[in-house]
């Protein structure tokens, strides 16, 4: 019984450009479906040339395959802003260094001289501040001492004035009793003779009035005015005589003289007391003014001392010294990271400025790749990656660590070349910076499944998926299978008749396997009638 194989192929199948392996996204997979009869291939059919595969359970990955170069994930540059000669170089290209290791040293003689000069300048400035503080402190102490001296002097003057005032007050107190007695006696006497005194005073006034009237009338020695004047004068004489008699009776002269003497002594003592009080008040005012002046001097000196203290505590501006010291530190160029020296631009005696060396970590490596634009939506940071390289004898693993958010357009046409990405290598043993590497980014994975090439699956007349398994008599028999996940190259199959190491025909699209030209023609006609494309037209 001859087998009629019909090929049902997809209308398009894209080829990936050189250097990139095709993305295995399920949405763009093109799978060849083959329709064949379910009868076993006969012994007469010559399949000795056909390729076969053996069934083994394993992983089936949906992947994006890319390639790139191995690079260091941690690259640091040893640089300097100084322009100076190199005095020593401690490493060479290829050396492994640790963070902090000295790469090279620069001539620091000029910087050290500048530091010495600057230190002397700053010390002089500090001494100037200290001297200003000491002087201000001396002025404060001097002002306080001057106030103490002035206070003692003013206290002496005040005490003398106070003693004089107290003595004058005591003198007033001493004469006051005698004065009060004399005044009392005088007042008693004056009260006793006051009537006669009043009459005498009235008579004197009347006499004066009569005299005035007489003179006004012409001053003749006759007439009413003259007579009135004579009568008033007579009456005054009488009243004065009566007053004299009263004074004699009450010892007026004695009491008046005693009172006058006591009053003079009393008035002199009061005047002396008032003068002494004035002198004391003036001494008090003078003391207050003198001490206020001392306080003003002290306050001015204290303010100057506080300013000097602030300036001393603040110190001098040593920023320029710190810059020089930093420049001195910078003459010893050290590795900022651990790794291997991959570039060295200086040697002893050369003038150095800018880049000195490049250090790349060999413990943290990445593969720098470009993800095609049509596959970027499938790839995410953190996805596992299988890595192979001719430089490494064993496969490596890693994960996607970075994806550029923008596509590159480096071909000059404006079209996208893809998205740059980094793949970190888990354990970069046996692989080197600059090596070429291939990376399989695993989008999804199924484990412990059978898988065969896409072309190994066909369909029988009932539309069932089948594969051809080699029998004991070296013939191939169709076996119905159920297909599952697939990628660009393989498809998952399952079925009760599948066993490990079963030999499967790798290409179910073989035409005219029986060698019958008629069957081949019939197959081609059937293919054309069903709108299918023969294999030889796929290019």
Image (cartoon, helix red, strand yellow):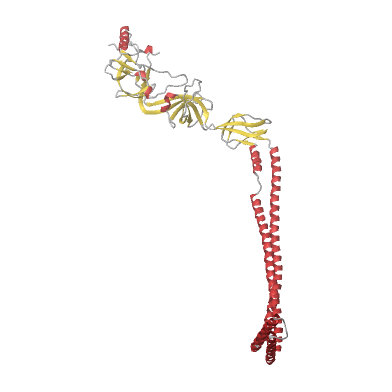
Image point 42% across, 28% down: which residue? 379
The image quadrant where one finds the N terminus is: top left
The image quadrant where one finds the C terminus is: top left
361 relative to 44, above or below: below
286 relative to 448, above or below: below
| In-front residue for pair 473/143 | 143
Q: Can I make out residue 184 in this image?
A: no
| In-front residue for pair 112/283 | 283
Image point 71% across, 73% down: which residue? 160
In the image, residue 316 lies at what x, y percent?
A: 66, 47
| Left or right: 454 in relation to 232 | left
| In-front residue for pair 188/490 | 188
In the image, residue 498 lies at what x, y percent?
A: 32, 23
Q: How many marks?
A: 0
- Give the farthest residue toward the front: 223
- Give the farthest residue toward the top: 517
Q: Can I make out residue 129 in this image?
A: yes
In the image, residue 207 lies at what x, y percent?
A: 68, 84
| Left or right: 118 in relation to 393 | right
- Give the farthest residue toward the left: 462
In the image, residue 395 lies at what x, y percent?
A: 46, 27
| In-front residue for pair 392/301 | 301
């Amino acid at each position: 019984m001859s087998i009629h194989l019909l090929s049902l192929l997809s209308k398009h199948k894209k080829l990936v450009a050189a250097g990139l392996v095709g993305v295995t996204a399920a949405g763009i997979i093109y799978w060849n479906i083959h329709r064949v009869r379910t009868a076993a291939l006969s012994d007469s059919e010559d399949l000795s040339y056909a390729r076969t595969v053996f069934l083994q359970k394993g992983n089936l990955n949906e992947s994006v395959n890319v390639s790139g170069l191995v690079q260091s994930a941690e690259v640091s540059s040893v640089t300097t802003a100084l322009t100076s000669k190199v005095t020593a170089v401690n490493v060479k290209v290829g050396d492994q260094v640790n963070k902090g290791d000295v790469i090279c040293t620069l001539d620091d003689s000029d910087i050290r001289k500048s530091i010495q000069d600057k230190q002397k300048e700053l010390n002089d400035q500090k001494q100037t501040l200290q001297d200003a503080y000491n002087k201000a402190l001396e002025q404060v102490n001097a002002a306080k001492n001057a106030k103490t001296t002035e206070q003692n002097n003013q206290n002496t003057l005040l005490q003398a004035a106070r003693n004089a005032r107290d003595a004058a007050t005591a003198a007033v107190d001493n004469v006051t009793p005698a004065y009060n007695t004399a005044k009392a006696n005088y007042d008693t006497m004056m009260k006793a003779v006051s009537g006669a005194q009043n009459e005498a005073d009235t008579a004197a006034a009347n006499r004066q009035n009569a005299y005035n009237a007489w003179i006004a009338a012409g001053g003749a020695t006759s007439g009413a005015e003259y007579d009135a004047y004579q009568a008033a004068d007579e009456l005054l004489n009488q009243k004065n005589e009566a007053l004299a008699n009263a004074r004699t009776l009450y010892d007026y002269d004695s009491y008046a003289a005693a009172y006058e003497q006591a009053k003079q002594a009393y008035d002199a003592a009061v005047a002396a007391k008032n003068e002494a009080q004035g002198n004391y008040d003036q001494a008090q005012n003078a003391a207050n003014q003198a001490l206020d002046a001392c306080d003003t001097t002290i306050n001015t000196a204290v303010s100057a001392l506080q300013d000097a203290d602030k300036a001393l505590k603040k110190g001098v501006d040593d920023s320029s010294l710190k810059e020089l010291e930093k420049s001195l530190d910078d003459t010893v160029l050290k590795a900022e990271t651990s790794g291997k020296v991959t570039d060295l631009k200086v040697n002893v005696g050369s003038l150095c400025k800018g880049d000195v060396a490049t250090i790349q970590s060999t413990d943290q490596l990445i593969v720098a790749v470009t993800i095609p634009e049509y596959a970027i939506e499938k790839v995410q940071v953190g996805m596992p990656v299988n890595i192979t390289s001719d430089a490494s004898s064993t496969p490596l693993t890693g994960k996607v660590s970075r994806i550029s958010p923008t596509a590159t357009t480096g071909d000059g046409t404006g079209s996208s070349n893809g998205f740059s990405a980094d793949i970190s290598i888990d354990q970069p043993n046996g692989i080197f910076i600059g090596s070429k590497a291939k990376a399989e980014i695993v989008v999804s994975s199924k484990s412990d499944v059978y898988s065969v090439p896409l072309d190994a699956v066909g369909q029988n007349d009932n539309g069932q998926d089948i594969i051809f398994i080699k029998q004991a008599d070296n013939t191939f028999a169709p076996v119905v299978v159920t297909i599952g996940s697939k990628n660009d190259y393989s498809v998952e199959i399952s079925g009760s008749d599948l066993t490990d190491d079963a030999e499967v025909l790798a290409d179910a699209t073989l035409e005219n396997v029986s060698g019958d030209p008629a069957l081949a023609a019939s197959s081609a006609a059937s293919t054309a009638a069903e709108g299918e494309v023969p294999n030889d037209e796929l290019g």
